[in-house]
Image (cartoon, rainbow, N blue to C red):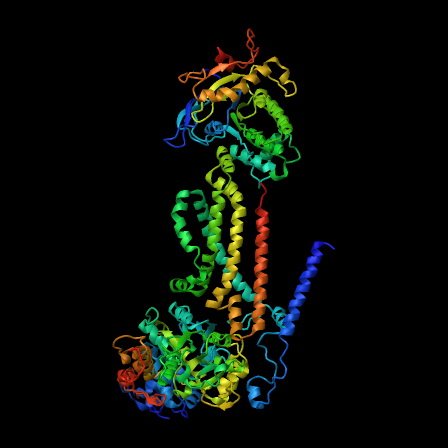
């Protein structure tokens, strides 16, 4: 095993204490000085710091894929964190963490890390606090009541920009999940499947700054319905969606699971479509932290990140989904019947119209906060008038989604740049180029921009 | 002003608004040490206000009140007040009501001494056995007795009673009046008392102040009660002075108080002090054998 | 038969009628068994009885028995027994209530004793009093920056007014005679305040406190449903998420019983300070 072993090779093992060599002897034999350290060696240090145990690292790399892992790790570490990790002490600055979550399957990696012991393994004592709604979560993050929190992917962008709240620089550590949402309609609409006929209907989304809001708007607008004028879109906390659907307050919602499946299970609604059918691989929720918190607690952040990454890796394996469903079902977490969660996580589900569907990638767990995702979100915020004037998409996303920052720094260090996004962004058949966001916005017939 | 004059009131007036006519004005009288003085007058003549000024609870618009050589400027433990509506604190027992006063007078006394002192006065007003009852469990007469015991318990230099028996039935009133006579006789207490009841005044008072009607009420006359002390309500009306005094008082209340207010009666408005009369004496009668020294001086 | 016994029998009869109506109303509907794909039925949970929907009295009884058999269990930061939830709610109510009392009683004294202060503060009180306590929540969260403190603040805000107004009213209407007694006895300001005005106004003040406590108990449930994280309101919200109506009904019963006990305790306190003039 040589110094230049690729640390992202799942089959190799890492031996040297400094992380640069497979062994101390090799280090000496190599006779190279610090100046000559390759970027790859530093990378090795990072990977080793993240996953001190080889078996763990291999499992993670196998599950996520080495490119994804590289990007994920690169996305994470500001210089301070990188150095802290290279020193390999990794003593966490803060052991007891409070992490907020909304009881939905999007937060699966975050939640399952508690019952499955991922936090504990990283020396963290995480208290997961179930929270009533997104506005409250936002306030509690800004209050510093929570160290980190489950946030909707657009929220850190909105908070950083001060849209809909005071401005506070936020970072997105990881995307929690991809896909996993659906449009659910009340049973009385089972013969009303054409969005063109939805004028006057009332829909719910979990929050203004949510993929749900943007995807629902996108979807109806593509069918000639103006989401601001032709239909009503209300904000309803996810846990209250089924009750509202049953009460007839809303005709349907684009909401997070398990509340789509729960509506089916309770025979009040049916799944009109999965958001995967709109955009396969769209992000939904994220693990958000205050930028200052990352700077103050780099090792804690790294430990938290490792835990969630491990969980994401485990969740990514379809074979584990049943176990996970059982782990997150109790009242302490989602408080849902296991069969409902199983249907969400395994993708074999009843659609509420008498059909059993099998969509294994109904929900995915790709943790990388790709830049382009952030740009797409901003483009929709621009499109619907949440952002006014000129939007510097790239600059904003680079500050919030840690991927670019780290990538740039790695380049300066001569480290391999992370690979590109695994999937191109294609929403309802229309490709999105992050470099031409304004043109993309201008191309829509229905918009507020 | 004689050495035994205990309280002197001069030029007292009260008006509630600068523009309004005074309720009373030019009120002047003296009370000797150990003397029992009653005030009689119609409602609205300011009797209670005068009592409140003496108690220090109200301030006069003009005039001064000097007690024992010092001008009154506020409430003081030197003057015990028995209020019209007994004013017992309903959340306290009989004993604690009195103890509240005793504790005010002697803050340093230990509880046992306070209790013993209270007991003495409870016994005095013959409420023994009712120490731990609350006022609501007492009859009207018993409540008023507690009020009297409370006022006496602080051993004030002067006692001020504001129509203390007004709300009581005739029988109860009679009984307590006699007790009051006995207690005052025993303690040589100086007393200033308001009443509506002519018989009560004759029974209790050494001197009766007659007030004209308000507004602009004044003390029109000072009636010296020439009945001998140690009176009892059973035989007081057998005394020859009794009806003379009584008739004089009733006549005043029915006719003269109004005429005097309107200035149609004989008392001159510029008269310095109210005249002193002894209606109990018939033509040629001697002045009473042993009226109080202060009284005698005033009469001469 | 004495009146009481007849009332009791009537109460029981009413309860029986309600339970019977409930039982009949929630009997499982027969004939809904359509010929569906067994796999679909399994996924829909139709193969076994579901715990959700309106429970029958028997299911309700079972829920109550389960909850009460272990009221202090602790299954994690978001899942604790009903006893612990009640304790959280009560502690918040107690804290907010005590703080409100600490403000309302002295301030009420000042307002009651001084027409000047009364005149100065009255416009503010009149404007602030009718505001729904929950309307303060967003502002509280934003400024206080702590959700537990915010819910305590909301309790404070809702319980301060009845106490303040009643204290001021009680103090202002203490019988003149008693104050005069204190004056003629040269009782000091503090002695007068604590030994005359306070006991004299206590029944009115306690009425205010009793009203405050009632409101506080109503509001804490709503506040906890809003900000969550433990407490009986959170319990209701959490069970609503799960559409578990039997647990929600159970919580409603518990809220009612606890409210009744609180009111009962204040009733005792009220009787203790009451007096007959």
Of B78 and B247, which appears nearest the observer? B247
Residue at position x 44%, y 86% from top? A193
Asked whether residue A69 appears in the rendered view, the answer is yes
Q: Quadrant of the N terminus of chain B?
A: top left
Q: Residue furthest right?
A: C1
Of A327 and C65, which appears nearest the observer? C65
Image coordinates of residue C103 in percent, x first then y, are 45, 51
Tally of numbered tags: 0
Image coordinates of residue C152 in percent, x first then y, are 46, 60
Q: Residue furthest left?
A: A390
Image coordinates of residue A19 in percent, x first then y, are 36, 85
Q: As drawn, is A350 to the left or to the right of A448?
A: right
Q: Is residue B17 above or below residue B246?
A: below
Of B27 and A96, which appears nearest the observer? B27
Quarter of the image holding residue B125?
A: top right
Image coordinates of residue C50 in percent, x first then y, are 59, 80
Asked whether residue B227 appears in the rendered view, the answer is no
Of A75 and A230, which appears nearest the observer? A230
Q: Is residue A91 above or below residue A53?
A: above
């Amino acid at each position: 095993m040589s110094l230049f072993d690729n640390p992202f090779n799942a089959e190799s093992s890492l031996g040297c204490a400094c992380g640069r060599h497979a062994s101390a002897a090799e280090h000496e034999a190599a006779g190279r000085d610090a100046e000559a350290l390759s970027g790859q060696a530093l990378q090795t240090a990072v990977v080793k710091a993240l996953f001190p145990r080889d078996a763990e690292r291999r499992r993670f790399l196998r599950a996520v894929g080495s490119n994804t892992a590289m990007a994920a790790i690169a996305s994470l570490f500001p210089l301070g964190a990188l150095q802290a990790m290279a020193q390999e002490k990794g003593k966490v600055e803060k052991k007891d963490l409070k992490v907020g979550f909304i009881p939905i399957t999007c937060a699966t990696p975050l939640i399952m890390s508690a019952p499955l012991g991922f936090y504990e393994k990283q020396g963290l004592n995480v208290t997961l606090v179930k929270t009533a709604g997104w506005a409250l979560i936002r306030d509690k993050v800004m209050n510093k009541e929570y160290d980190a929190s489950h946030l909707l992917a657009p929220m850190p962008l909105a908070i950083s920009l001060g849209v809909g709240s005071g401005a506070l620089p936020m970072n997105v550590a990881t995307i929690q999940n991809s896909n996993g949402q659906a449009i659910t309609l009340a049973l009385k609409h089972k013969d009303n499947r054409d969005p063109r006929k939805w004028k006057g209907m009332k829909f719910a989304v979990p929050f203004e700054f949510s993929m749900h809001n943007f995807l629902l708007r996108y979807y109806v607008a593509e069918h000639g319905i103006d989401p601001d004028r032709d239909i009503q879109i209300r904000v309803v906390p996810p846990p209250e969606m089924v009750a509202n659907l049953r009460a007839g307050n809303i005709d349907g919602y684009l909401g997070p699971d398990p509340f789509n499946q729960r509506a089916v299970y309770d025979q009040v609604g049916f799944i009109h479509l999965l958001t995967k059918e709109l955009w396969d691989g769209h992000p939904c929720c994220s693990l958000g932290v205050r930028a200052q918190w990352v700077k103050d607690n780099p090792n804690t952040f790294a430990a938290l990140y490792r835990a969630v990454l491990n969980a994401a890796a485990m969740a990514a394996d379809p074979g584990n989904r049943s176990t996970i469903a059982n782990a997150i079902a109790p009242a302490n977490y989602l408080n849902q019947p296991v069969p409902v969660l199983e249907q969400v996580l395994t993708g074999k589900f009843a659609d509420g119209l008498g059909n059993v569907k099998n969509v294994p990638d109904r929900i995915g767990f790709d943790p990388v906060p790709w830049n382009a995702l952030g740009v797409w979100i901003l483009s929709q915020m621009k499109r619907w008038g949440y952002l006014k004037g000129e939007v510097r998409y790239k600059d904003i996303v680079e500050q919030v989604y840690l991927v670019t920052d780290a990538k740039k720094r790695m380049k300066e260090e001569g480290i391999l740049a992370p690979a590109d996004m695994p999937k191109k962004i294609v929403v309802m058949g229309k490709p999105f180029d992050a470099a031409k966001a304004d043109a993309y916005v201008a191309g829509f017939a229905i918009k507020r921009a | 002003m004689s050495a035994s004059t205990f309280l002197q009131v001069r030029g007292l007036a009260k008006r509630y608004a600068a523009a309004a006519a005074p309720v009373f004005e030019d009120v002047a009288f003296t009370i000797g040490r150990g003397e029992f003085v009653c005030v009689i007058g119609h409602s609205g003549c300011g009797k209670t206000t005068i009592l409140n000024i003496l108690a220090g609870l109200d301030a006069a618009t003009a005039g001064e009140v000097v007690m024992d050589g010092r001008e009154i400027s506020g409430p003081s433990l030197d003057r015990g007040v028995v209020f019209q509506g007994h004013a017992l604190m309903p959340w306290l027992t009989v004993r604690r009501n009195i103890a509240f006063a005793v504790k005010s007078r002697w803050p340093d006394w230990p509880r046992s001494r306070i209790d013993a002192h209270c007991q003495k006065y409870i016994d005095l007003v013959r409420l023994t056995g009712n120490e731990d009852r609350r006022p609501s469990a007492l009859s009207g007469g018993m409540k008023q007795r507690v009020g009297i015991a409370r006022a006496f318990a602080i051993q004030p230099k002067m006692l001020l009673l504001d129509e203390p028996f007004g709300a009581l039935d005739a029988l109860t009133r009679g009984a307590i009046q006699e007790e009051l006579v006995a207690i005052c006789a025993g303690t040589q207490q100086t007393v200033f008392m308001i009443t509506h009841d002519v018989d009560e005044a004759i029974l209790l008072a050494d001197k009766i102040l007659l007030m004209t009607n308000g507004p602009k009420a004044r003390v029109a006359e000072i009636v010296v009660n020439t009945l001998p002390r140690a009176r009892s309500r059973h035989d007081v009306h057998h005394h020859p002075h009794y009806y003379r005094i009584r008739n004089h008082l009733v006549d005043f209340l029915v006719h003269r108080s109004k005429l005097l207010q309107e200035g149609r009666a004989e008392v001159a408005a510029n008269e310095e002090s109210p005249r002193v009369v002894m209606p109990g004496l018939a033509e040629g009668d001697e002045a009473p054998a042993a009226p109080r020294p202060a009284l005698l001086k005033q009469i001469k | 038969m004495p009146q009481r016994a007849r009332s009791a029998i009537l109460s029981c009869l009413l309860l029986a009628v309600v339970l019977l109506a409930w039982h009949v109303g929630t009997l499982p509907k027969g004939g809904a068994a359509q010929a569906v794909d067994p796999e679909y039925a399994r996924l829909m949970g139709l193969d076994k009885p579901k715990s959700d929907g309106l429970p029958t009295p028997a299911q309700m009884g079972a829920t109550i028995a389960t909850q009460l058999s272990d009221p202090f269990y602790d299954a994690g930061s978001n899942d604790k027994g009903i006893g612990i939830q009640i304790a959280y709610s009560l502690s918040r109510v107690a804290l907010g209530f005590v703080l409100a009392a600490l403000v309302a009683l002295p301030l009420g004294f000042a307002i009651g004793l001084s027409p000047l202060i009364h005149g100065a503060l009255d416009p503010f009180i009149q404007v602030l009093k009718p505001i729904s306590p929950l309307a303060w929540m967003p502002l509280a969260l934003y400024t206080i920056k702590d959700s537990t403190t915010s819910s305590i603040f909301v309790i404070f805000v809702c319980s301060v007014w009845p106490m303040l107004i009643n204290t001021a009213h009680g103090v202002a209407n203490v019988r003149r005679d008693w104050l005069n007694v204190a004056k003629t006895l040269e009782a000091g300001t503090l002695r007068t305040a604590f030994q005359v005005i306070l006991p004299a106004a206590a029944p009115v003040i306690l009425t205010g406190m009793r009203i405050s406590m009632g409101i506080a108990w109503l509001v804490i449930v709503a506040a906890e449903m809003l900000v969550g994280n433990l407490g009986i309101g959170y319990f209701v919200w959490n069970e609503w998420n799960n559409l578990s109506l039997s647990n929600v009904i159970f919580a409603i019963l518990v809220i009612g019983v606890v409210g009744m006990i609180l009111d009962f305790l204040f009733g005792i306190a009220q009787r203790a300070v009451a007096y007959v003039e």
